[in-house]
Amino acid sequence: MKNQMTPFGSGGSLAWLAEGISIEDSQDQLRSELQQLPNPMSTSQEVKISVKRQRLSARIDKFHSNGQAFFKGLEINGDFTLQDDPEFCGKEEEEEGEEDREFWGEDDGYWEVPGEEVEELASELTSIWMPSSIGSAKLTELGLVDLLKEERELRIGQANDCLDQLRTDLGNKAMLYQQNFQTANSTREGTRTKKEIQKVVARINKHVRGYQRARQAILRLDPNVDMAEKYQEILPNDLAVSQEVTEENRFGQGTSKLAWFWMMEGEQSQLSLQGGALMEECKCMLL
């Protein structure tokens, strides 16, 4: 059965863009896995990582090759770009220490750019060449406005999906913190709860990284002040658990300020529905 026409262009371009976003997610997953592994890795671990890198590299090469049809012969480069905020690249399992570091995973998780002696960039560090890599001005000049609009809507769906998942896991984190506060005298229950908190924090950081990638793309495709106000940067303090959760009868309760993403309504919700619908359509195309 032939794909139905989308509001902006062909189903082929939408599926291609969705594959690019999927590759970025796979790169993020591989970077996270690498950060959990010991240094040096065992032989079996090195083999598994090598296989994953080869598969990911093959997907990237195919993606860039298919992209030539949409970029009208524009040269595609796979340079390194630091995509993730190191603030949200903490390990899933932290050593016991200060409470904030234990639950936050605030480490110096910078990814180093390989030196000149490395012939080829690791696949998890290679930039994915998409319309957002070029920017709105150049895309308009090249007559690629439809491609710009398609990625913009997909990125809006991606950003809102990440925010939905973020709010859900922040709620889970708050409940776990409350449970940990109430069972502070039980070593066994406290340890179990802390491990659950670490797992939730790892998911929260993943959602934030995905949102930040989507946000950066949106702002390159639509450098409008209104768009920047709708999709703001997420800071570590935005993810903190309020004392109102852990201390029910705290003096001054009710005065804490919620982060901006808890108050998204109106037009923002409509954008979420439109972008989310496009993402679902693309997922069907890729199956």
Image (spheres, helix red, strand yellow):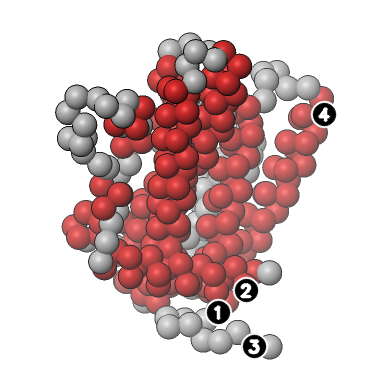
On the rendered structure, is 81 left or right of 267? right
Q: Which residue is mark 2?
A: 285
Q: Residue at x 73, y 36 (%)?
A: 49
Going from N to C along the chain, the mark reached first, 1 or 4, is 1
Relative to 117, say whether 95 is above or below. Answer: above
Q: Which residue is mark 3?
A: 2
Q: Residue at x 47, y 16 (%)?
A: 184
Q: In what element is the residue under mark 3?
A: loop
Q: In what element is the residue under mark 1?
A: helix
Going from N to C along the chain, the mark reached first, 1 or 2, is 1
Q: In what element is the residue under mark 4?
A: helix
> Do the numbered discs 1 and 2 sit on residues whose CB atoms are within 8 Å?
yes
**C-alpha separation, residue under disc 1 versus residue under disc 2:** 8 Å
What type is the residue that disc 3 sits on? Answer: Lys
Q: Nearer the viewer, mark 1 or mark 2?
A: 2
Q: Which residue is mark 1?
A: 11
**C-alpha separation, residue under disc 4 versus residue under disc 3:** 44 Å
Going from N to C along the chain, the mark reached first, 4 or 3, is 3
What type is the residue that disc 4 sits on? Answer: Ser
Q: Quadrant of residue 39?
A: top right
Q: Quadrant of the N terminus?
A: bottom right
**C-alpha separation, residue under disc 3 versus residue under disc 2:** 10 Å
What type is the residue that disc 1 sits on? Answer: Gly
Going from N to C along the chain, the mark reached first, 3 or 2, is 3
What type is the residue that disc 2 sits on? Answer: Met
User: Residue 157, which numbered label?
Assistant: none
In percent of width and height, residue 200 lies at 52, 36
On the rendered structure, is 245 left or right of 131? left
In percent of width and height, residue 199 lies at 56, 33
Q: Which residue is mark 4?
A: 44
> Do the numbered discs 2 and 4 sit on residues whose CB atoms are within 8 Å?
no
